Image: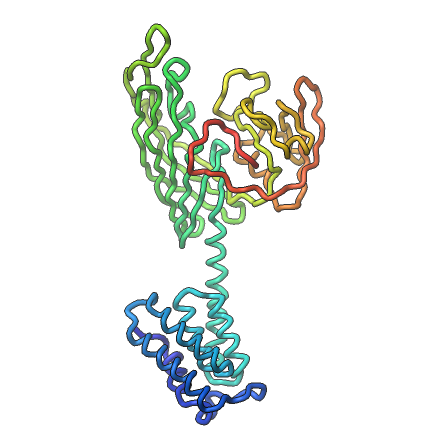
Amino acid sequence: MRLSSAFVLGTLLSLAGPAARGQADPAPAPVQAPDKATFDEARRHLVRGAAAIEMAKNDGDLALAADEFQKAVTIYPGWAFAWMNLGQVQARLGRLPEAMASYKRFLALAPEDKEAGKVGDELIKLEFRLEQSARIRNRGGIWVGEAGMPFLAKAEGNSLVLKTARQRMSARELDANEFMGGEAGIPVREFRLELQGTKVTGTSTRSEVVAGKCTVPAETVEVEGSYDEGAGRLILKMPRTRFQSRTSVNLFLDPVDCRGVTSLGKEEVQVVLLGPLPEGGIGIPVDLAYLPGGVLIRHEWQGHLGVGSYTAPLTDRAKSLGFQKMDEIVSIDGVAVKGLAPTEVIRRLRGPVGSEVILGVLRKKAKEPETLKVTRVPVAPPAADRPYVYEVWVN
């Protein structure tokens, strides 16, 4: 395995020492040449680094060379070519900020060197690579899915994996006699996507689900769609099977056994995911299945956004902001909640930490909403990969 010719040249010239620099490495005035013992020790580490490169079988093995070159520049900070050699190895190891710092040090020490132009070009390339790495890294985090539930996203290269265990099967996916036969469980959902520009391909997987005494089979399908990085929006199209499950009950209405699971056919669906969500939010639990006056627990978006949940008291933060039990958020920054998809509702609640959002809040039995101005605070990422019973999470 070999590094570039610039590295080889740098190594050979570096080994000559201060007395043999010539035109290739003019000694900068501010840097005092080391004594012979100091230089010999720095040179020893440079030679050891060169040996590590000769022994390396892959880029990962270059870490030993980087360690030796780092020792060389620590002993003799004014050795320009040692900095260049260190920068090249750091770049190969993917240590981009460190490589850029080493290259800049080389240019500061030897701005007129014949390798300076090449090193300057490498700096530009590293800046671009760093920007692309940041773009990819920024795709990770918390996204919000079609039911307003959180997905945990991990990005690497052109791949994006989004996973949740918080989104149950909707009525479009499962027709189950839940009231009589027992509630259906929550599946694990995962999108494995490849992003090429705006084009998206990949797979969607849903785990099997227990509904009463029945087991609805898992499903994996191909997906395609588009990615709008500026808008933070994924639009995915895929086939989805709708199932019917029936659990029989006894005279006491206890589930007894499964009468059958039937496929009702496939339909093409479009799924929109938004993200990653900003870190800031109003910092209180909101209920995406809230229904004013509702007695039964519901699990799907009804066009109403509740504060807290039926089963839990208000949080201290919610109380301090002026919220009351059974409040409903009817507008966000003047936009009516009822006309929004749950994904958009969640994203509008989010924003930079310290920014303000104006909420229209309808109190229980009130006819007109009140206005609350809330300063966004950091919101901890939810445990999107663990099941949670109700459609309530902090935003």
Quarter holding residue 217: top left
- Total numbered circles: 0
| Res. 338 visible in picture | no
- Residue 326 lies left or right of residue 244; in this view the side is right
The quarter of the rendered structure image containing the C terminus is top right
**Where, quadrant-wise, is the N terminus in this rendering?**
bottom left
Identity of the residue drawn at 50% across and 39% down: 382
Along the line of sight, the residue nearer the viewer: 255 or 169: 255
Name the residue rendered at 64%, 41% in the picture: 376
Q: Position of residue 58 (x, y in %)?
A: 30, 67
From this view, report whether residue 101 is shown above or below residue 326: below
Residue at the far top in the pictured view: 251
- Above or below residue 323? Residue 122 is below
- The x, y position of residue 25, in whole percent, is 48, 87
Q: How is the image coloured?
A: rainbow
Residue drawn at 49 percent across, 43 percent down = 142
Q: Residue at x 45, y 49 (%)?
A: 198
Quadrant location of residue 14? Answer: bottom left
* 178 lies left or right of 359: left
